Image (tube, rainbow, N blue to C red):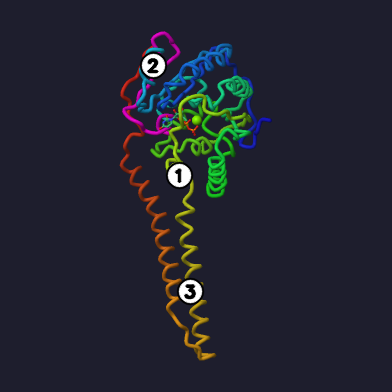
Amino acid sequence: MIDTRLASAAPRPGRRRRGKTLSVVIPMHNEAEGLDILFARLDAATSDLGVKVEIVCVDDGSRDDTFERLAARARSDRRLRLLALTRNFGKEAALTAGIEAARGHMVVPLDADLQDPPELIAEFVALWEQGYDVIYGVRADRSSDKRLKRLTAGLFYSFFNLLSDYPIPSGAGDFRLMDRAVVEALNALPERNRFMKGLFAWVGFRQAGVPYVRPIRAAGATSWGYFKLWRFALDGLTAFSTLPLRIWTTVGVLAAVLAVAYAAVIVAQVLLYGRQLPGYASLMVVVLFGFALQMIALGVLGEYVGRLYQEVKSRPVYLVRERIGFDS
Ligand code: UDP
Ligand code: MG
């Protein structure tokens, strides 16, 4: 049932959906194939919600005709607003663009491939009325994902929560409903590395989780390879923890203690037993071990310094090529 462990306070009921607007934000990269089913499902799921609906689609540099098809649809569908980025900036940037452009009292990010079932939005809105500010979907069953993806995702979430002070509920993704106040808080965050799941957890507010079964992709193919997921995991970890940086002081001290202890053993062996230690093998092991430690430490440092550099340059998170439907 609903999970309220992250609620920072008791919900404050009394919200009314009447006259309110709900924005659905959909980042899209090469999703032309699935657009028809997406809108059919979305229309069915939102037609009797009792709120005004705005659909913000962000074309994240698609190479197929996603944008053209959306633009054609926008001519007849007044709810549709369209944002085209100048190239592929990645899902986090596209989502940021969409959330910044959304104007509703409630904002729901949604994947274009229908892996976030739009039917759940009705339940989200009901909980919003009950006074929750963030209602997130929790994947109760990930059997639609490949086993390796499930394993790596599970490892990542446990590791992330071990290191970060702001736990991401396991199984929670970007699919959620956020109150305007939460959206304002997110939009005010100046950082450029937008690891949205982490930022969603960081902002706090009264949060509640709703379990759902994650279906397989309705059409098209995922654009996340394992290498991209690895970079993504590093982005998330470095953005929410400095432990990988700080741990090297401890590792260094431990290595030094080990070295001194081993030196004492060698001295004792020579002085007490008159043993001549053949040096080559032990020397190689110690040298290589020390060398490896330094390389890892340097690599970790590099991960942070590189990101620091990115932030300092202050380039915008995304650039917009075209906007459609935003002037009404
Ligand atoms: N997406 C995007 N830019 C990208 C990659 C993906 O906007 O560079 C969108 C994609 O169109 C979809 C959502 O992000 O709406 C989730 O992507 P996908 O389904 O490929 O990810 P998965 O479900 O495999 O994690
Ligand atoms: Mg997907």
Residue 259 tag number:
3
Q: Amino acid at mark 2?
A: Arg
On screen, residue 324 versus residue 164, left or right, reads: left
Between 274 and 262, the residue placed more toward the observer is 274
SS under mark 2: helix
Check disc 2 and report the residue beneath it.
Answer: 69
SS under mark 3: helix
Query: Residue 185, percent across and down?
Result: 47, 32
Query: Residue 270, percent across and down?
Result: 49, 88
Q: Quadrant of residue 212?
A: top right
Above or below, 56 against 208 in this view is above
Query: Residue 192, percent across and down?
Result: 38, 38
Q: Earlier in the sequence, mark 3 or mark 1?
A: 1
Q: CA distance from mark 1 to mark 2?
A: 32 Å
3 or 1: mark nearer the eye = 1
Q: How many marks?
A: 3
**Residue 232 colored in magenta in the image:** no
Q: Which residues are magenta?
A: 74-95
Q: Amino acid at mark 3?
A: Ala
Say few, some or many: other residues with alpha carbon within 10 Å of mark 3 (under 14 / 14 to 19 / 20 or more).
few
Above or below, 268 against 245 in this view is below
Q: Quadrant of residue 316?
A: top left
Say few, some or many: other residues with alpha carbon within 10 Å of mark 1 (under 14 / 14 to 19 / 20 or more).
some
- Label 3 beta carbon within 8 A of ligand 1: no
Q: Disc 3 vs disc 1: Cβ atoms closer than 8 Å? A: no
Which image quarter is the N terminus in? top right
SS under mark 1: helix
Check disc 1 and report the residue beneath it.
Answer: 230
